Image (cartoon, rainbow, N blue to C red):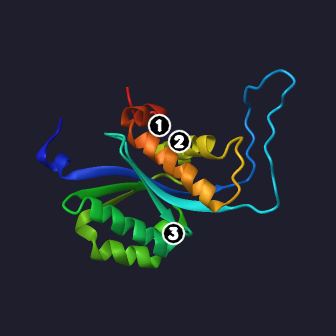
Amino acid sequence: MITKETEDAVLLYIDETHIRSYHVLRSTWSEVGRQKQVPAFGHHAHVSRFGAVNIHDGETVLHPTTAAHAATFLDFLRMLKERDPDRLIILVLDHARIHHANMVKEFWREEGPCFHFLSLPPYSSQLNPIERLWKWLKDTVIANVFHQNRDDIVQAIARFVDDIHERPEEVLQRLGCAG
């Protein structure tokens, strides 16, 4: 049942991930006698993203970052607040150190009324639907694919994000959040 209170709140599962150009090989189909070839070289480009998924409507937010640490996590929280300035933002998150750093705790005290944090039990990443989004992203973007540089990865992520934003129902189904 939707009430005034639920309309004024948004529930987001959040986490961060690193997408590396390591040569992830997954099983795939190919013509008989024509094995898939994935070129490789010695350096490994990477990008990092903070992400949030709303399990009620399938909306996703992927926020680029240079690295995942407390300061960049605060940037992500501020961005979420700007997106929904008049709503209570309920965040479900794991026990990563950056989520509980002193500077983050200070931010929580200052911004108390607009955020509510729910911690998942330790070592229970399977309870966070965004982990399934990360798997889907990596299966789409880096599995059996060669990226020459960081920009190639960024462009592939952008295509993935554009695609999932067009299909929130599929997002909910892929994350196990739709009936």
**Between 124 and 166, which is closer to the camera in this rendering?**
166
Secondary element under disc 3, as helix, strand or loop, is helix
Q: In this view, does 62 lie to the left or right of 2?
A: right
Q: Label 3, on which residue?
A: 98
Q: Which mark is residue 132?
A: 2
Residue 18 is at least partly visible in this image: no
Q: Residue 115: x and y, percent?
A: 29, 63
Measured along the vertical axis of the image, is residue 123 above or below residue 126?
below
Please tell me whether mark 1 sits on a helix, a strand or a loop.
loop
The quarter in which the C terminus is drawn is top left
User: Rounded to the nearest whole Å, what is the CA distance between mark 3 and mark 1?
Assistant: 24 Å
Q: Distance from label 1 to label 2 (Cα)?
A: 6 Å
Q: Which of marks 2 and 3 is nearer the N terminus?
A: 3
> Tag 1 or tag 3, which sits nearer the N-term?
3
Q: Residue 175 carries which label?
A: 1
The residue depicted at 27 percent of the width and 51 percent of the height is 10
Between the C-alphas of marks 2 and 3, the distance is 21 Å
Q: Quadrant of residue 45?
A: bottom right
The three-letter code of the residue at mark 3 reads: Ile
